[in-house]
Amino acid sequence: MWRDLAPIGRDATTTGYRRYAWTGADADCRAWFRGQAETRGLTYEVDRNGNQWAWLGDPAAGDAVVTGSHLDSVPDGGAFDGPLGVVSSFAALDELRARGKHLAKPLAIVNFGDEEGARFGLACVGSRLTAGQLTVDQAHTLRDADGVSLPQAMERAGYDPEAIGPDPERLARIGAFVELHVEQGRALADTGDAVGVASAIWPHGRWRFDFHGEANHAGTTRIEDRRDPMLTYANTVLAARKKARLAGALATFGKVSVEPNGVNAIASLVRGWLDSRAADEKTLAAVVEEVERAAVERGQRDGVEVRVTRESFTPVVEFAHDLRDRLSGLLGGVPVLPTGAGHDAGILSASVPTAMLFVRNPTGVSHSPAETAGEDDCLAGVAALAQVLEGLACH
C-alpha cells in the first residue's frame, strides 16, 4: 500500500508532496482509497462533503468504530502526515481478519477531505462541514490563490457542491473515532516509545495581517519618504517570535503575498498569515493581541495601515478521558501526551468520542519532505491500532 501511494502528488524537484484538495493528485489519492476498499470487499461511499468511507458491517446499525485520517498535504509536505493513518487503518483491518476476529460493531475507515487547508486556507474543511463547524455560506466564500471557489473546484472534480453541509445523521452512527497519526514533535523520541496516546490538542488559529502602504520606485524614493509595508511586516514577524517565546507559545508567519511583487518596486500591500498556538486559550489570545499591537505601533511609524482578520480558530480539545484511558490501558500504559497540531479528530471531538494514537517521529520534523518514521515503528503503530480496534469493536 505504501509503495503504491508514495508516488502520487510527489514533486520531482523538492521530493515533497503537493496533494491539494480537488486537484488531479487528490483524485488519484481518492482512487487509491476506493481501490483499497473494494479490494477488501468493503462498502464504499462518499458523503455529502466529499469525505470517503469504507465500511465493514452495516453503516446504519449505529455505535460504529471509525478510524482513518487524510491523504492531502501541505505544500511540499512529507509522506507520513495523514497517509500513515489511512494506510495503517487498512493494515490494522487486515490484521484483525488474519486473526479471525469477528466484529460486534460496524467498522469504518475514512479519508477526510482537505484536512491541511493548503488550497483554500482553512484546515479540516471536510470534517468541519460534517460537524457543522463550517457553514455552507462560509464554505462558498473560500477561494484559492487563483480565485477558484471551493464549489467550483468540487464541481470540476465531479462532486456536487450544492450537497455540502452538516451531516448529523452520519455522526450519530459513530460510537468512537480513533485517528492514528505520525507524531509531529519529538516527545516519543525522547521517551523511547514507539507509540503514544493523545491527551489534548492546543487551541490554535490563523490570522491574516494586511499591511497597506504605498507603491513607489525602489531607486528614486528617499527612505524618509517611503510608506513601505514590507518593513512593518518584517518587524511584525520578529515581534511574533518574541511574544510567543516569552509566553511559552508558538507563533509563525509561514505564508506571505506581496503586491505588486516587483524587485524594483516598493510594495503597496503585504499580506501575511499568522499561525499561533498555545497550551490554553487565554495565552493564545494574549499572544495574538500583542502581535497585533506591535504591528499597529510599527505601522504608525512607517505610515502603514494594518488590518487583522481572524480566518479560523479551534478551541482547546480535551479528548474523551474514558476513551483515552481505555486506549492507554489496552496498549499497556504507553505515554499520554498533548500536541500543538490540529487534526480531524479534534474537530469531531465536539460531536463524538474521539482519541488519537501517535507513532514516533525520530527527528520531530513534519510538514517537510524530511518527515519520517521508522518501518518498525510504523508496524508497531499498526499493531497498536489493531489492538485498539479489537478492544472497541470486537467485544
Image: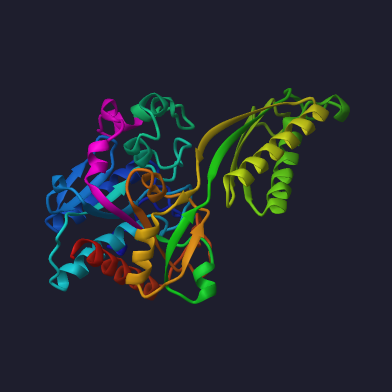
Q: Position of residue 292 (x, y in %)?
A: 69, 35
Is 341 left, or right, of 70 in this rendering?
Answer: right
Q: Position of residue 340 (x, y in %)?
A: 53, 54
Q: Position of residue 45 (x, y in %)?
A: 18, 43
Asked if residue 114 lies in the magenta stretch, the reply is no
Give the magenta part as a residue range: 153-179
Along the viewing direction, whichever of 36 and 145 lies nearer the viewer: 36
Asked if residue 165 lies in the magenta stretch, the reply is yes
Quadrant of the frame with the N terminus = bottom left
The colour style of the image is rainbow
Q: In the rendered image, is residue 184 in sight?
A: yes
Is 325 left, or right, of 61 in this rendering?
Answer: right
Q: Residue at x 53, y 51 (%)?
A: 202
Q: Residue at x 16, y 57 (%)?
A: 105
Q: Residue at x 49, y 63 (%)?
A: 337
Q: Residue at x 59, y 50 (%)?
A: 278
Quadrant of the frame with the C terminus = bottom left
Is 123 drawn above or below residue 164 in the view shown?
below
Is 130 drawn above or below residue 163 in the view shown?
below
